[in-house]
Amino acid sequence: SLTGDLVLAGKKLSFTKTVLTKSPARYGLSGFLDFNQAEEPQFTINATVSEGSAKEILGPFLTEFPLQAVVNGNFTVQGNPAQFLLQSKLVLREGSIYGQHFQKGEASLEVTRSRVTFTKVRLWKQQSVMDGSGWISFNKQFAAKITSEKLHLEDLDLFQGLTPYIQA
């Protein structure tokens, strides 16, 4: 369901105190959609999310992104469909990214049409805690820095099945 204060003035739709509910997710929204330039509509959206889906947040902007998790936090997106910037601070519940499962996490990220930048990530799984930053571009390039003061190889999905060999 969608409830809130919506105002249409000319070709600009403004919204405040707007709540989008898609059980169990709840999104609090404010901002505007400006259709004065129909070929490149402008937008600014500020949102808080509770029990949301990473795919639902990123889906309108990215056709595919391998983060699957229930998220809480906030995000802002502004620009137009061809050139936008999405910035977010999210708390992640159990999920996975690029096939690595985690029990919980925190992520600050920026998304543009050409790349996803992880300004700060922290993931927990079993006894391990991993910190990271970096970026992934959509032309198959990436840079990453991953550190851990407490990493157990058996907690990494990459090493599943090799546990008898790495526990010695």
Image (cartoon, rainbow, N blue to C red):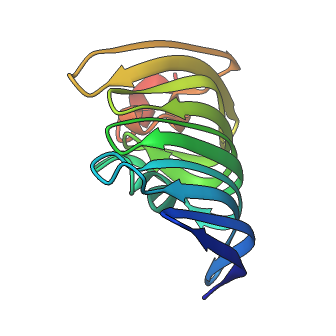
Residue 105's place in the image compared with 159, above or below, is: below
Residue in view at x 60 percent, y 88 percent: 1
Residue 38 visible to the viewer: yes
Q: State the image quarter where residue 133 is shown.
A: top right
| 111 sits to left or right of 122 | left
Residue 88 location, x and y as percent?
A: 64, 40
Between residues 80 and 161, which one lies in front from this camera angle? Answer: 80
Residue furthest to the front in view is: 10
Number of labelled discs? 0
Q: Position of residue 117 (x, y in %)?
A: 50, 24
As drawn, 25 above or below 122: below
Please tell me which residue lies in front, 2 or 73: 2
Depth order, front residue of 28/36: 36
Location of residue 143 with respect to 98 vertically, above or below:
above
User: Residue at 39% of width from left, 56% of height from top?
Assistant: 59
Task: Say whether residue 69 is visible.
Answer: no
Is 58 placed above or below 83 here? Answer: below
Q: In x, y percent, where is residue 20?
A: 63, 77
